[in-house]
Image (cartoon, rainbow, N blue to C red):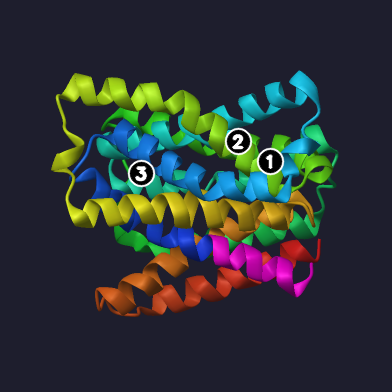
Amino acid sequence: MTTPTRLSLLGACALWAVSFVATKIALQAAPPLTVVSLRLLVASVCFLPLLVLTGRWRRIEGWRDWLRLAGLSLFGAGLHYGFQTVGLQTTNASNASVYVATGPITILLLAVAFLGERLTARKVLGIAIAVAGVLVVMGPETLARFELSGSLAGDLLVLVSIVMWGCFTVFGKRLTDRLGALTVTSAVTLVGAAWMAPVGWLDLQRTAFSLAAITPAAWAAVVYLGAGCNFLAVLLYFTALQRTESQKVGVYLYSIPPMTAVAAAAVLHEPITPGLVLGTVLVISGVALTERG
């Protein structure tokens, strides 16, 4: 894997690491599906000029490509973020953290089954070490709070959203290899925003909520989620996916929990624990081993 590819993945994961804080801020001021619709709208405003000015939309060949992109928009845009956002409201953070750790495993299994990527002992060991690192970063207290007696619906929504991202990564790779990362991510976001717009409007009607009630801090969070996470991070992620195997891209997702913990230490002055240091070393070791698999 080249250095630019690694930097793209680390940049994407760094942006996503802060997304949990931004989502929490946005949800304090607006309904969940409204937040999803707005962040996709912001991302579309970022993607559309690039797609038009570069002429990349001409790479899309006929209705079959548009049908594939529409399907990907379900897995990587509207439904993925919708399920995850609603699920996070009804399940506890400890459960969600454990479920998120299964994401790269989903990508690995799907890549082997549908893309014919090789499953080597080194890759399996690398992912196992990275999983151990994430669990160490979480710490025993977080793991002890994991329970299945809470909101089963919320747990299932978060799990389904994770599987959807795995499908988005794996099934989006072939199309990305042919059309390019910018074309795929732009079209997926634009289509996702188009069909999520009426969903967001219905959410506003159902909750009798007014956009005027959204605070400046919540608007800033929405803009960050749209421009930072749905636009820049997704574009960086798929640019890396175009250059290497999906398994090697997916394992970088394990760097998000350590990055989130480091951000919390820097911004919220939370302590740097031995578990964070050890877990980060394990994650880096697991990622490096998987790359060499």
Badge 3: how crowded within 10 Å, few (<14), some, or many (20+)? many
In the rendered image, residue 101, in percent from the top left (x then y), is placed at 50, 50
Please state, as top left, top right, bottom left or bottom right, where the C terminus lies in the image: bottom right
In the rendered image, residue 133, in percent from the top left (x then y), is placed at 52, 65
- Say above or below: 119 vs 122: above
In screen coordinates, is 270 left or right of 159? left
In screen coordinates, is 178 left or right of 65? right
Q: Which residue is mark 3?
A: 95
- Precedes in sequence: disc 1 or disc 3: 3
Q: Are marks 1 and 3 in contact (CB under 8 Å)?
A: no
- Outermost residue on the front side: it is 53
Q: Nearer the viewer, mark 2 or mark 3?
A: 2
In the rendered image, residue 67, in percent from the top left (x then y), is placed at 69, 21
Q: Are marks 1 and 2 in contact (CB under 8 Å)?
A: yes
Q: Which residues are magenta?
A: 1-12
Q: Which residue is mark 1?
A: 184
The amino acid at mark 2 is Val
